[in-house]
Image (tube, grey):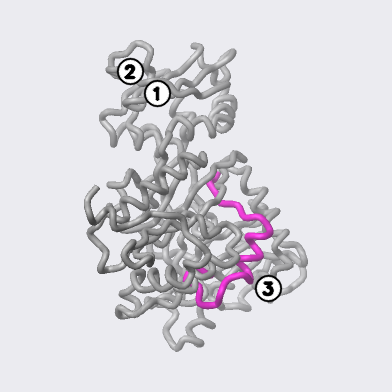
Amino acid sequence: MTEESERYLVRPGRACDAIELARLQASVQLQAATDGQPHPGIAAWVEDLLDGHPSVVPDDFLVAEDSTTGRPVASLVGLRQDWSLAGVRLPVVQVELVGTALEHRGNRLTDRLFAALHQRCAADGVPVQMIEGIPYFYRRLGYDYALANDGAPTVPATALPARGHDLPEGSRGSLTVRPATIADADDLADIDRRLAGGDALICPRNAEAWRYEIAGRRPADQARRAVAVLVHDADVRGYLVHTVRLSTAGELTVVAAACNRPADWPRAAAAMHTHLGHTGRQYAASAGQPFAAVRLLLDQQHPLARLGPPGVPRRPRGWYVRTGDPVDLLARLLPVLRDRWLAADLRWHEPALTIDIYGRAARLEFTNGELTAVMARRGAVSPSTDPHTHAAMPPGALLQLTLGHRTLPEVLDIWPDCLLGDRLTEHFLTVAFPRVPARIWPRN
């Protein structure tokens, strides 16, 4: 241990850290927006996380403390949440507010905080960690771009319908959009429960979480969003979530949109775009700035994007994702893999299918051709020549397949060391790993 490394103690957060952590993070996050001054929105976000957030307790923060002063000088927070794919629960920790005081940088405090976080996730059985952050930076900490969180066109404000072009808001029998109230929380939770059984990867919220999003945050909280509901008479049929102000570029950003009846989407999209146009113009008038566009922070195939006015295409961005145990991640999604093969009327002809991950291996066990277990095994010395290995994949390739970020043909094109034993294995794994829409609005 060096003298500098002994100077810092990495420990869990405490409730009494709230003032210090709010001050620290406000001084290092989004400084370009405040000309180097503390960011009030970040401070309010930290205070909210440490004061009543439904997914966070003080212990979820990790703090690097300067032993010479006893003060926090670096920190991050792991926000625990459950995602869902085809009804299968997937525990996730979203990493946020990673920051180090300027005078303490260069001491590898970020590395130490992440090492502690990953150790905690392994002990708690949380298979996935994700973060949206600096390009490339988190690759060196074991993360890979394995989820898309953007790509839908940006719709110019001039292309949005004006309120009154359709049925007036509140007309009987029409689909309209209004601001949500805490009385809508149970209905919103019901919608998320139904969506959780679909083919998209989502982050469902229960009623408590919806109440918090609607009315629980401080007004200045950087993570606060406006929630609106799609209604048919008194029936809540969907939701729309967007920012509470325009960006400096004059954009209103949509972070989530859902409709529990697919057949409603053409009318729902029209009502949502009308609401967004009206809201954007209100925000612009209040702030005294132009309303330029609606930015859909959604995937390209999202119904709100496909069924809305044409916009300016955007390149999809990525979220960093990490798993400390790819085999465990596969095992958790066993019901999804089994159902995909059954739906395609596929039965594996051997007792097992082995996927080597270069150091470890996943043994997929079958009974009468149906998947029954996923077990971890030691990897082969030479997977490319081992007669018992059906496929070999780098961990990053398997992670992207498992989360549906890429299909098998795409992985084979990108990774030369992704190897398949025969065409039958290729067909089975192609069916097992289709592309999955990532429609995640994390619980931050």
Amino acid tagged 3: Leu
Amino acid tagged 2: Ala
Residue 418 placement (x, y as % from top left): 31, 28
Q: Are marks 3 and 2 in contact (CB under 8 Å)?
A: no
Q: Are marks 2 and 1 in contact (CB under 8 Å)?
A: yes
Q: Residue at x 24, y 47 (%)?
A: 1
On screen, residue 22 above or below 324: below
- How packed is label 2: few (under 14 Cα within 10 Å), some, or many (20 or more)? some
Residue 16 shows up from this direction? yes
Residue 306 placement (x, y as % from top left): 50, 56
Describe the element under mark 1 as helix, strand or loop. Answer: strand
Of the two numbered discs 1 and 3 on the same chain, state the one appearing first in sequence.
3
Magenta segment boundaries in residue numbering = 200-224
Asked whether, in this view, residue 209 is left or right of residue 408, the answer is right
Q: Quick one: 250 or 389, which is closer to the camera? A: 389
Of the two numbered discs 3 and 2 on the same chain, state the one appearing first in sequence.
3
Of the two numbered discs 2 and 1 on the same chain, state the one appearing first in sequence.
1
Q: Quick one: 189 or 13, which is closer to the camera? A: 13
Describe the element under mark 2 as helix, strand or loop. Answer: loop
Q: Quick one: 281 or 70, which is closer to the camera? A: 70
Q: Residue at x 35, y 27 (%)?
A: 357
Asked whether, in this view, residue 399 is left or right of residue 140, the answer is right
Magenta stretch containing residue 64, yes or no? no
Q: Are marks 1 and 3 in contact (CB under 8 Å)?
A: no
Q: CA distance from mark 2 to mark 1?
A: 8 Å
Residue 234 is drawn in which quadrant? bottom right
Q: What residue is pinned by disc 3?
A: 167
On screen, residue 348 above or below 265: above
Q: What residue is pinned by disc 2?
A: 380
Q: What residue is pinned by disc 1?
A: 361
